[in-house]
Image (cartoon, rainbow, N blue to C red):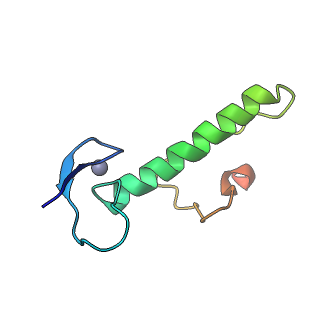
Amino acid sequence: MNTLYCACCGQPFHRSSPRGPAPLYCSRDCRRQIEVRRRVWASLALAERVPAAPRVTPAPRGAGGFHQGGMTWERASA
Ligand SMILES: [Zn+2]
């Protein structure tokens, strides 16, 4: 049996299925967390590379406005 460590919270967990690529996270929640963090990191990196770009404020956790591949928080002022 494979023991894996969550890339988000670091907890050990067992992969539920031997098929497919090994999961990186212990739960869907952790996967979402990393997705959110990645976007924040990406926007920060972008902001550093382009000083003139407006700062993007990450949406608060649990806002429910995240869509796959979309930068929905750019229109969070609505
Ligand atoms: Zn986790």
* Residue 20 visible, this orientation: yes
Tell me where residue 39 appears, x and y as whole percent.
Answer: 60, 46
Q: Residue at x 52, y 49 (%)?
A: 36
Residue at screen point 65% across, 62% down: 69
Q: State whether residue 25 is above or below residue 44.
A: below
Total marks in image: 0
Residue 67 is left or right of residue 32, and the answer is right
Q: Nearer the viewer, residue 50 or 67?
A: 50
Q: Residue at x 74, y 26 (%)?
A: 48
**Quarter of the image that includes the N terminus:** bottom left
- Residue nearer the viewer, 41 or 20: 20
The one of 12 and 78 positioned closer to us in this rendering:
12
Q: Quadrant of the C terminus?
A: bottom right
Q: Compared to 74, does 28 lie above or below? A: below
| Residue at the image position 33 percent from the left and 54 percent from the top | 25
- Can I make out residue 58 in this image? no
In this image, 57 relative to 2: left or right? right
Where in the figure is residue 67, as x and y percent of width and height? 60, 65
Q: Is residue 73 left or right of residue 33?
A: right
Q: Quadrant of residue 15?
A: bottom left
Q: In this rendering, is residue 12 above or below 18?
A: above
Residue 3 appears at what percent x and percent y? 17, 53
Q: Name which quarter of the figure residue 21 lies in.
A: bottom left
Q: Position of residue 58 (x, y in %)?
A: 61, 42
| Quadrant of res 49 | top right
